[in-house]
Image: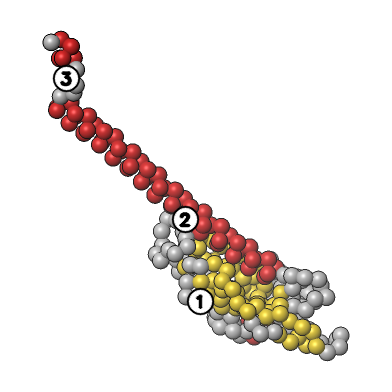
Amino acid sequence: MTRLRDDEGFTLIELLVSMVIGTIVILAAFAVLDATGTLATKAQDRVDATQRGRLAMDVIGSELRSQVCLPGAIPPVEAGATPTSFIFYSNLGDEDDPPTRRRIYVQGDALMEQTQAGTFAGVPGAQTVNWSLPTQKTLVQPVAPVGTTPYFRFWGFDVNLPATINTPLDVTPLSAADAADVVQVDISFTSRPTRATVGSPRDAVFQQSIFFRTADPMDPGKGPKCQ
């Protein structure tokens, strides 16, 4: 009889208690996995937005700093620039290479670049530049403004102040005279994770002031010059 009692096994109550405890452990494990997955997704979104935004800012900065004047002392920034679009000329190659015409602009929720390769025409000293058909690419998407700050803001040389101080050129589109005075462009945008439709803490903010032209304070005329 003793042997039979030892082989009776678990009671119903013991089985129920074991099942409840096992269920709680499994649910807790799933909750931890779910929370870990959510945190990993948030971290990946933040990295995604930061990497793509930084790459776009690096591209814009390197191109702006390579600005050049066209033959005939035509300034590097075209008239008509606005807080969402501007055109300038740059040269990322040899100093004798023809310039490239670039347009940086906002289209919907994308920061875009349009490029036209240039070719010289005419003889040295009387050259002009012909432009190829435009090609375009997306620099970063999706993007949004940084609060009320415009995507692009332009600064000009103030002839009444030291050469290191600029004056904002906020009357846009820029006139030809204001475009010729541009010495600095402020770039501001918010880079969002891929497929994001609304702002979130995962957004990455990018703001940079790119000073790309100089002016000689000893020059009686003062102001940025084409070389």
Disc 3 element:
loop
Q: Which of the two marks, 3 or 2, is nearer to us in this view?
A: 3
Q: Earlier in the sequence, mark 2 or mark 1?
A: 2
Question: Which color scheme does this rendered protein use?
Answer: secondary structure
Between label 3 and label 1, give the one nearer the viewer: 3
Circle 2: residue type: Asp
Q: Which residue is under mark 1?
A: 107
Query: SS for tag 1?
Result: strand
Categorize mark 1 by other alpha carbons within 10 Å: few (<14), some (14-19), many (20+): some
Q: Position of residue 177 (x, y in %)?
A: 65, 84
Can you tell which quarter of the image residue 181 is in? Answer: bottom right
Quarter holding the N terminus is: top left
The kind of residue on which mark 3 rests is Glu
The reply, left or right, for residue 178 in relation to residue 224 is left
Secondary element under disc 2, as helix, strand or loop, is helix
- Does residue 31 sit above or below 150 in this rendering? above
Q: Is residue 124 left or right of residue 59?
A: right
Real-space CA distance between mark 2 and mark 1, rounded to the nearest whole angstrom: 22 Å
Residue 69 appears in the figure? no
Q: Position of residue 82 (x, y in %)?
A: 55, 79
Residue at x 74%, y 73% (from the top left corner): 91
